Image: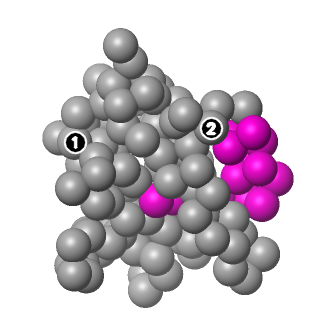
Amino acid sequence: MVSVRVERFQRMVDALADVQRGKGGEYETFGVRGKRFGYYWPRTRTVGLKQLLSEQQALVSERPEVFEEQFTAGGFGWVVVHLEGIEADELSELVYEAWRLSAPEELVAAQPAPPRWASR
C-alpha cells in the first residue's frame, strides 16, 4: 500500500523557505509570509493544500479515493490529500506547489523546485 508517514510530510514542509506553523483547534496550519498554504489533521491523517482550480479538479476526478475537494477561495481550489494513498514524490510536488502559490516571488526564485531530499 502506498502511504506517506506524517514525519515525512513534516520534512517536506520544513524544507521550504520561511514556513510558519500554527495551531487551530484540531489541526496544524502552514503558511509563508502570512499566507496560508496548508493544513494537517492528525485525527484523519489528511493534509489540505492550496492548488490551482484546474489542478484541484483534475486530482479529485482522477483519484477520488486519495483526493477530496475541500473548498475554493480567491481563485484557488483547496484539496484534501489522504496520506494513505499517495507516494512521497507526488506529495512533495503538491506541497511545493501549494507553497509556491503563496510565497513571494523572491522566495520562489530562490527555491524554484521542491528539495529532492525532502521526499525521501
Q: Is residue 40 left or right of residue 74?
A: left
Q: Amino acid at mark 2?
A: Pro
Q: Position of residue 79 (x, y in %)?
A: 58, 56
102 falls in the magenta region: no
Work out which residue is located at the far right of the displayed protein and give it: 54
Residue occupying the point 28% across, 47% down: 45
Q: Position of residue 104 (x, y in %)?
A: 57, 74
Residue occupying the point 58% across, 50% down: 68
Look at mark 2 in the image and give the residue it sits on: 64
51 falls in the magenta region: yes
Foreground: 78 or 103? 78
Work out which residue is located at the far bottom of the displayed protein and give it: 34
Q: Position of residue 39 (x, y in %)?
A: 38, 65
Residue occupying the point 69% across, 65% down: 77
Foreground: 85 or 35? 85
Look at mark 1 in the image and give the residue it sits on: 6
Residue occupying the point 46% across, 76% down: 36
Q: Position of residue 87 (x, y in %)?
A: 44, 24
Instruction: Assign the N terminus to one quadrant of the image.
Output: top left
Work out which residue is located at the far top of the displayed protein and give it: 1
